[in-house]
Structure formats: C-alpha cells, structure tokens
Image (cartoon, rainbow, N blue to C red):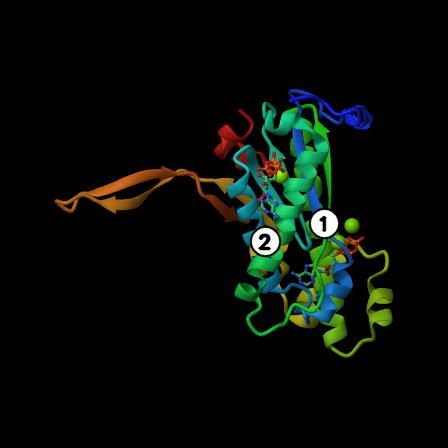
Amino acid sequence: MAKSRFEYVKHFEADDRLLPHCWIVVRVDGKGFTSFAEEHAFEKPNDVRALGLMDKCAREVMQVFDDIRLAYGESDEYSFVFSKTSILYGRRSSKLVSLVTSCFTSSYVRFWAQFFPETELRRTPIFDGRAVCYPTDAILRDYLAWRQADTHINNQYNTCFWALVKSGKSRAEANQALQGTQTAFKNELLYTTFGINYSTLPAIFRKGSVILRTKSSRVVDHLVDGTPVEQETNAPTVCHDDIISNSFWDQHPELLA
Ligand code: ATP
Ligand code: ATP
Ligand code: MG
Ligand code: MG
Ligand code: MG
Ligand code: MG
C-alpha cells in the first residue's frame, strides 16, 4: 500500500522493547482501593469476595496470555511473570502492560456480580500497571519473596488494627498502639487479647495467592461406544503456598526452567 505523507509521524514512537532473556513482571494495582473498599463495604481486614474476584481476574489474564508462567496476588495487586524467552508483541512494554492491565480491569467489571451479587458496583474500578525486567532467577525469586513478605507484614498489622477497632478503639488509638511494634508483640497481642492464633488464619490472608498452570486431563467428548475423549489442559490454578522457601521451587522445577 502506498504510504501517505503523514506516515513519518510513526517515527516519533519510542522503542520500548524490554531486555531479552530477562524475566518480565507486569504488576497491576488498584487505584484508590482504600476508599473503593470502604464504598463497597469490604469486610475488614480481609474480604474473601474481593480476594476471590482478584484471583478470578488473574486466572482470566493467564487464560488470555499463554506466556505467563506464574502470578502472585495480594490485596488489590497482582504480579504476572512472563517467561524469559517470551517474544509476545516483540516484548514491547507498553503493549504488555496495557493489555494485561485492561484485561484485568475489564474482567473485574465482568465478574463483579459473581462475587458481589448483593453489591452494586458504584464506581469504575481502575488499575495501574508497570513492567519490570529481572535478569536472573534469583532476583525474580527475591521479587516474589518481597511481595509475599509484604502480604505478611500488612496482614499482621491489619489483623491487629481491625481487632482493636472492632473492640472499641478509635482508628487513631489502634494505630498508636501498634506504632513501632515487632512481629512477636503483634502475635502476642492477637493471642492474649483476642484469642486469635495468627498461624491458623486462612492461608489466603497470610500468604496471598499463587497461580500456577497445572496439567490435568478433562473429558471433552464421548465416542459412540461411550469412550471418553480426554484433552490435556493447563488450567491456571490458585494455591496459597509459601513461595519464599526453597521447597516451593524444588516442587515446581518447571517454573524457572
Ligand atoms: P493507590 O492508588 O496508591 O494504590 P490504594 O488506596 O489502592 O492507593 P494500596 O496500597 O494499593 O492503596 O492498598 C490497597 C487498599 O485496598 C488497602 O487499604 C486494603 O486494605 C484495601 N483492600 C484491598 N483488597 C482488600 C480486601 N480483599 N479486603 C479488604 N480490604 C482490601
Ligand atoms: P490488533 O490486535 O493488532 O489491533 P485488530 O484485529 O484489532 O488487531 P486493527 O488494525 O486494530 O486490528 O483493526 C480494527 C478491526 O476492527 C478492523 O478489522 C475493523 O474493521 C474492526 N472494527 C473496529 N471498529 C469497527 C466498527 N465500528 N465497525 C466495524 N468494524 C470495526
Ligand atoms: Mg499503589
Ligand atoms: Mg492500590
Ligand atoms: Mg495495593
Ligand atoms: Mg486493534
């Protein structure tokens, strides 16, 4: 096709291809979810419906983009790990970030009513997105460990904070009582004052959500003689494993291969 004289404007586009042979992580995070959570009466500290919706959106993203190996989510954020060798959209950052973020966001709206049948969606949920390259397996693992450690720190704080608030303290007083305290103090407070054993809280609260592709076979049809026709699937599956420890990676050697 003949080029128009306007074609030259294309050259103003920046080359944003991400480094080859690096892990690409695209992370999305809800904008203003502190007030979004309040407006939609999320249970505190952890609303299981909202976490379920986040996991559903992340599974949808993984179904759309085969090159995503693994995802990790907590609160209003999700990280998607693209394989080192992915050449999807020429590794162009803006393409990957915008597609993952819009897929996630539109899924949030699409599946809202499944998780919040009684709550009207009163605001347009929006998510920011970014892509970061990690050059080695060890640094990728540290990235994921950083997110899961964050989940733990936030959850422990929030569990204490909301226990204090629900027991009658003001938010300011609860915050004051927790200022500068260590893990051991918070565990003790939960146990002695509120009878909560932190380590027995649901794993989804303490560890966040990890999504892996698990191989399984699914019956897709039956032959005339009744023989089932099976198809291998690689369905994204959610678990709440500890991804900081070595044992998780030893159990899933294919993730870093
Ligand atoms: P920003 O736009 O900068 O991301 P934010 O208000 O979204 O601001 P975050 O640091 O992303 O701030 O924190 C997410 C907020 O959403 C927290 O206040 C958290 O308590 C709330 N939130 C997210 N998911 C849940 C949930 N499942 N249950 C209860 N609260 C939640
Ligand atoms: P890519 O993922 O590369 O963007 P694409 O299929 O979306 O692929 P585009 O170059 O973006 O390709 O073209 C948009 C396509 O959508 C065209 O085929 C166009 O005819 C169709 N389309 C978009 N809007 C309309 C519309 N309002 N009515 C009819 N067809 C439309
Ligand atoms: Mg943020
Ligand atoms: Mg946020
Ligand atoms: Mg967040
Ligand atoms: Mg198009």
> Which label is found at residue 153?
none
Quadrant position of residue 211: top right
Instruction: Give the residue at the far left of this rendering.
Output: 225
Q: Which residue is drawn at 59% across and 26% down?
A: 86
Instruction: State which mark lies toward you, 1 or 2.
Output: 2
Q: Where is residue 33 in the image (x, y as percent from the top left)?
A: 74, 59
Q: What element carries label 1?
A: strand
Q: Which residue is drawn at 72% across and 75% down?
A: 166
> Which label is found at residue 107?
2
Disc 1 CB within 8 Å of nearest ligand 4 atom? yes
Q: Which residue is drawn at 51% across and 48% down?
A: 238
Above/below status of 209 relative to 19? below
Give the mark, 1 or 2, whose residue is nearer the N terminus: 1
Answer with left or right where residue 64 lies relative to residue 46. Answer: left
Above/below status of 214 relative to 22? below
State the CA–CA distance, disc 1 to disc 2. Answer: 14 Å
* Image quadrant occupied by the N terminus: top right
Above/below status of 30 relative to 23? below
Q: Residue type at mark 1? A: Asp
